[in-house]
Image (cartoon, rainbow, N blue to C red):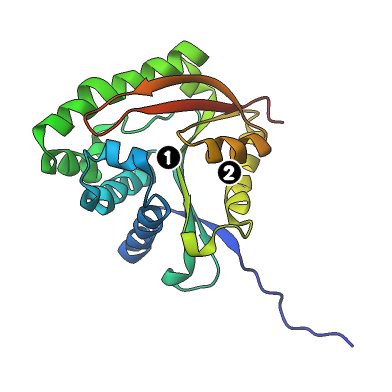
Amino acid sequence: MSSDAPSDPYPLVKSLDSTSSDAEIKQCATILVEAFKGDPFSSVLLGGDLSLAPTEFDAQLRATLIGGAVHALALGPLVEDLVGVALWYPPGKSVFSSAEERAAGWDQFMDSVPASLKAWWTDYFGPTMGKMSSDALGPDYSLKAWHLHIFGVHPAHQGKGYGRVLFEFAEQQAKETHSNIVLETTTDVDVKIYTRLGFHICGGTEVKSDFGNTHVRLMIKENLS
């Protein structure tokens, strides 16, 4: 006996763009807030004020929609069916590299935080991360690699393979351009996860702040074809 009923297309990965709804963007921001809840590095990045997380992730999403690529994993057709999100920058692009990207929400976020935190981001954190990458991979690495900027699956849906589905969607695009993939992470658990996906550590740096110190690992997956 056979059936002509269409197979269930979910889970599927969809690319968000400038036509995506505000509700979709906010749902993706919520996913990231929940995914990073309890992460010590988030407290460092936000100066100990975790109430800033929704605004920060919203700004990151809106900037990436302009300069990069936002992929969302959906379990169904509704906005609330989005359960995972990945922010990517393709070769030749980098985070907040244009005034348009910064004006989409990042400038407003920076203006809302204490002056000390704003100075930490602009005068210390940004240059420290840039130096780590250029020391390990060379000054022009961003022209040759896909950069996984932020990645998260809602805790209620972790451990089901959705993260791998989300990652492999972008990995296929990197293979088409024969590009490496680079990312930064701060936890031993994530290092193990990305190692299983074929990454290895290629650099690192210590990030210091009044709210804690964190060792950032730079990881790369090379020679995709």
- Figure check: 95 above or below 61: above
8 on left or right of 24: right
Residue 111 placed where, x, y %? Answer: 12, 39
65 on left or right of 143: left
Q: Could you tell me which secondary element the residue under label 1 belongs to?
A: loop
Q: CA distance from mark 2 to mark 1?
A: 12 Å
The answer to whether residue 207 of the structure is visible from this angle is yes
The answer to whether residue 139 of the structure is visible from this angle is no
Three-letter code, disc 2: Ala
Which quarter of the rendered picture does the N terminus lie within?
Answer: bottom right
Residue 206 placed where, x, y %? Answer: 38, 21
Q: Which residue is mark 2?
A: 170
- Choose between 22 and 31: the one closer to the eye: 31
Neighbor class of circle 1 (other Cα within 10 Å; few <14, some 14-19, many 20+) is many
Neighbor class of circle 2 (other Cα within 10 Å; few <14, some 14-19, many 20+) is many
Q: Which residue is mark 1?
A: 68
Q: Report how many numbered discs are placed on residues in the image.
A: 2
